[in-house]
């Protein structure tokens, strides 16, 4: 039986919303769970009872910049909600918010419905999908920004790490994974162990190595000076992942 991915839309643009709805309806394995024009219209209790797999959101809407909202949404069990973000890229503060939240796909607001559907499909397979131009803009933004030190970050659901004096925001799932590696610093931890400890699942129940790989990638995007040659979190096809002792000395946990 084919798995059905539930998609929630938080979009203002009528054109892209209509195009994406048509693409969703024409693509097997996806259903439109709901949509809203404003974050204030989202019924969190309803979503908590039946979380979507993917949220497509236009972050150029200022009301979507509430970090507490996203830390709450991404902490819903039994899975982390994947986020497909849209932005014009003109606002540095918007890109900072997107970095802080940790999204799985990033595209311009003028994207076509068919291209956006391809991105949703990639994210459903735990693949990261970033527009090249926006990715270059994101890379120019320092990891630490005063804009990210607002009161929303005082939420107990939102953790951070301090790397060489820079505060780096982690999503709840990223925080759980990092903390588990930190507890076993300099030890190789298998994918199976991480699935059980962090996701509370295993491969027999649908857990996959891609879940772990995707989360590790997002953490590396935030803490590694060079993701091609990581120095903090190492990986091995046979052994799993390891947080190096250099990280234990240089990264201080903050809650």
Image (spheres, helix red, strand yellow):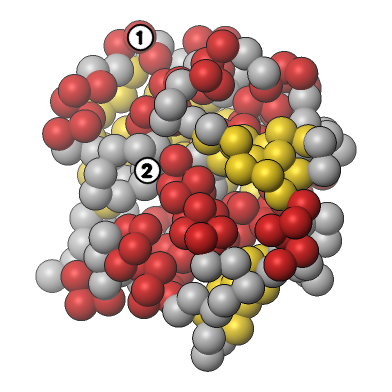
Q: Is residue 179 visible?
A: yes
Q: Is residue 252 left or right of residue 166?
A: left
Q: Quadrant of residue 196?
A: bottom left
Sort mark 1 into few (<14), some (14-19) or many (20+) by Cα contacts within 10 Å. Answer: few
Relative image position of residue 18 (x, y in whole percent): 38, 28
**What is the number of the mark on residue 154?**
none
Q: Residue at x 43, y 75 (%)?
A: 191
x then y, percent, for residue 187: 57, 76
Measured Cα–Cα span from mark 1 to mark 2:
18 Å
* The N terminus - image quarter: bottom left
Eyeballing the image, is 70 above or below 139?
above
Q: Which residue is mark 2?
A: 81
Callout 2: 10 Å neighbours few (<14), some, many (20+)? many
Up the image or down, 19 lies above or below 148; here it is: below
In the drawing, does residue 164 fall left or right of residue 25?
right
Which quadrant would residue 161 be assigned to in this image?
Answer: top right
Is residue 117 something one can see in this rendering? no
Q: State the SS at label 1.
A: helix
**Rendered residue at 24%/49% (across/down):** 78
Q: Horizontal placement of 198 versus 87: left or right?
A: left
Residue at 60% x, 52% y: name it: 218
Residue tagged by mark 1?
40
């Amino acid at each position: 039986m084919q798995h059905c991915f539930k998609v929630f839309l938080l979009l203002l643009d009528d054109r892209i919303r209509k195009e994406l709805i048509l693409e969703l309806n024409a693509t097997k394995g996806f259903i439109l769970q709901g949509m809203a024009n404003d974050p204030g219209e989202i019924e969190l209790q309803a979503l908590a009872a039946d979380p979507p797999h993917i949220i497509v959101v236009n972050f150029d809407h200022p009301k979507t910049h509430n970090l507490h909202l996203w830390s709450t949404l991404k902490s819903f069990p039994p899975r982390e909600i994947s986020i497909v973000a849209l932005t014009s890229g003109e606002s540095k503060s918007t890109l900072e918010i997107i970095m802080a939240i940790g999204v799985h796909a990033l595209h311009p607001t003028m994207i076509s419905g068919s291209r956006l559907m391809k991105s949703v499909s990639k994210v459903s397979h735990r693949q990261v999908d970033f527009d090249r131009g926006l990715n270059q803009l994101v890379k120019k933004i320092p990891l630490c920004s005063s804009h990210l030190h607002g009161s929303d970050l005082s939420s107990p659901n939102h953790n951070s790490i301090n790397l060489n004096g820079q505060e780096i925001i982690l999503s709840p799932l990223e925080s759980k994974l990092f903390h588990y590696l930190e507890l076993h610093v300099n030890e190789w931890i298998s994918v199976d162990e991480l699935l059980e400890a962090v996701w509370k699942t295993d491969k027999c129940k649908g857990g996959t190595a891609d879940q772990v790989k995707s989360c590790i990638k997002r953490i590396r995007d935030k803490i590694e000076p060079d993701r091609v040659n990581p120095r903090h979190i190492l990986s091995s096809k046979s052994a799993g992942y390891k947080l190096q002792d250099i990280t234990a000395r240089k990264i201080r946990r903050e809650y």
